[in-house]
Image (cartoon, rainbow, N blue to C red):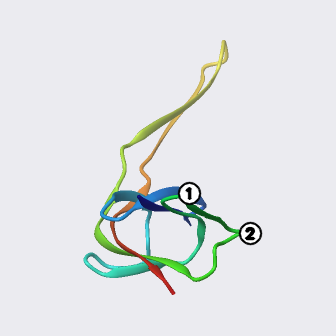
Amino acid sequence: MEYVIIETGGKQYRADKGAILEVERLPAQNNSSVTFDKILLHVNGSDVRVGKPYVANIAVKARILENLKGDKIRVARFKAKSRYRKVRGHRQSLSRIQIQDIVKA
């Protein structure tokens, strides 16, 4: 089984061929292809390559399925006994991608 650990948007994701991931919003349109070259780990059966910090000559090709917004979270702050309350919400902008292939460049 072959998989990689990619870095995008300051986070790390495990990417198998055909996997669908939700990552931080990418600056591309729906149904366009993107290439990730920040590969931290590449595993192919018993062959394990760890990057320092990135693995050379490996790239991941993916297709953007859709750009969407994540679930709303509610952030509340208050101070007891002083009538101080603030409530804010946040919805993260995401891109849903499908991993097409792991290529050796």
Q: How many marks?
A: 2
Please tell me in which quadrant of the rendered image residue 65 appears.
Answer: bottom left
Question: Up-down: is 11 above or below 42?
Answer: above
Instruction: Name the spot of residue 35 as percent of width and height, x first.
Output: 45, 80
Packing grade of label 1 (10 A; few <14, some 14-19, many >=20) is some
As rendered, which of 10 and 83 lies closer to the eye?
Answer: 10
Q: Residue furthest bottom?
A: 105
Q: Which residue is mark 2?
A: 52
Packing grade of label 2 (10 A; few <14, some 14-19, many >=20) is few
Question: Up-down: is 22 above or below 55?
Answer: above
Q: Residue furthest right?
A: 52
Q: Which residue is mark 1?
A: 12
Residue sitting at 57 percent across and 57 percent down?
11
Instruction: Name the spot of residue 73 as percent of width and height, x first.
Output: 44, 39
Residue sitting at 44 percent across and 54 percent down?
92
**Nearest to viewer (mark 1 / mark 2):** 2
As rendered, which of 93 and 84 lies closer to the eye?
Answer: 93
Question: Up-down: is 91 above or below 24?
Answer: above
Q: Residue furthest front?
A: 46
Q: Is residue 32 left or right of residue 4?
A: left
The amino acid on which the numbered mark 1 sits, given as a three-letter code, is Gln
Q: Is residue 85 left or right of residue 64?
A: right
Q: Label 2's element?
A: loop
- Measured Cα–Cα span from mark 1 to mark 2: 15 Å
Q: Which of the marked residues, 1 or 2, is nearer the chain's N terminus?
A: 1
